[in-house]
Image: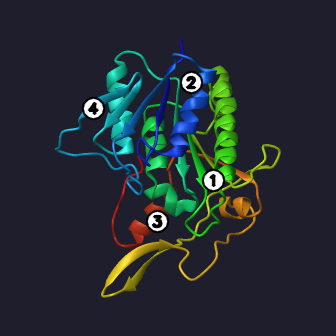
């Protein structure tokens, strides 16, 4: 029996989570477990709870509330399964975009997928591109889009269960724009420039994406793809190796004698 773990960062009442769970449980009865933060934890990234208690409460059968971060939820799920390792983790459906290098580091949705990938569990992160500088469609359109995003997740989960993710891919980040179509999909890279800013008002600051501007990105980026009505599929790897020779030359210029290992 496959074990599919579902997590999110929007909390247990998120329509994206509920749409995903409904479709996954219909496609994989008895194989889906949800470990979800008990409140919204957007922006938590891959942070974990240090030195504190993480409570777990079963709200419904196979649906567990975690008093921690999305990454905590993955660790709790792994511990709860004992010797059984999940076959795949699905994080989302996030009710908002997760685009670019900046969101990669701060998104709880992606952070949960990274935590799973670190434990060698294939992970899919799914985000619905509404708000945060992007248009918000009608309730009817949102429901239709979430159903499409969930159906996309099912197709990919089935593929991962058979063959795993492609070689060199540890997790897959998907951003689904409003009114998306499955026949309009692009393989993309992360947008590289920062777009979150601190905005001052009344003697204080708040953080906002794209303040005073419209979202924009170069062709080939995830931002460009969703702006042009493509489902953005961004393959990601945890291999963060850098060029050691260049660093050695840099350190030798400073009078050090480093050893390459």
Give neighbour class at mark 2: few <14, some 14-19, many 20+ (Cα, 10 Å).
Answer: some
Q: Which image quarter: residue 55?
A: top left
- Percent across and percent down for residue 99 are 58, 59
Where residue 68 appears, as percent x and y from the top left, is 29, 43
Say which of marks 2 and 1 sits in front: 1
N-term mark: 4 or 3:
4
Q: Is residue 129 left or right of residue 111?
A: right
Of badges 1 and 3, nearer the viewer stands 1
Q: Which residue, given by chain and number where applicable, does mark 1 sit on?
A: 139
Q: Say which element carries label 1.
A: helix
How many residues crowd around disc 3 within 10 Å: few (fewer than 14), some, or many (20 or more)?
A: few
Residue at image point 40% right, 21% down: 61
Asked if residue 36 lies left or right of residue 143, the reply is left
Per the image, label 4 sits on a secondary structure element best described as strand
Asked whether the residues under the numbered discs 3 and 2 touch, taking CB atoms below 8 Å apart as contact, a structural biologist would say: no
Q: Position of residue 59 (x, y in %)?
A: 35, 29
């Amino acid at each position: 029996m496959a074990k599919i773990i579902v997590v999110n960062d929007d909390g247990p009442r998120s329509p994206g989570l509920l749409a995903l769970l409904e479709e996954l449980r219909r496609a994989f009865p008895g194989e889906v477990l949800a470990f979800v933060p008990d409140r919204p934890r957007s922006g938590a990234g891959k942070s974990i709870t240090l030195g504190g208690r993480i409570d777990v409460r079963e709200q419904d059968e196979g649906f567990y509330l975690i008093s921690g971060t999305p990454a905590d939820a993955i660790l709790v799920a792994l511990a709860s399964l004992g010797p059984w390792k999940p076959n795949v983790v699905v994080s989302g459906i996030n009710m908002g975009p997760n685009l670019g290098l900046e969101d990669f580091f701060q998104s709880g949705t992606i952070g949960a997928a990274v935590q799973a990938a670190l434990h060698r569990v294939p992970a899919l992160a799914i985000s619905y591109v509404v708000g945060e500088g992007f248009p918000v469609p009608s309730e009817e359109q949102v429901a239709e889009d979430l159903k499409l995003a969930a159906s996309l997740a099912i197709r990919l989960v089935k593929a991962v269960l058979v063959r795993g993710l492609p070689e060199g891919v540890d997790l897959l980040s998907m951003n689904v724009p409003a009114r998306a179509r499955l026949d309009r999909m692009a393989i993309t890279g992360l947008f590289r420039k920062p777009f979150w800013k601190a905005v001052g008002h009344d003697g204080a600051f708040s953080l906002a994406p794209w303040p005073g501007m419209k979202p924009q990105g170069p062709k080939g980026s995830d931002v460009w793809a969703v702006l042009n009505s493509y489902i953005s599929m961004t393959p990601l790897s945890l291999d963060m190796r850098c060029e050691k020779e260049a660093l050695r030359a840099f350190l030798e210029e400073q009078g050090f004698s480093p050893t390459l290992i």
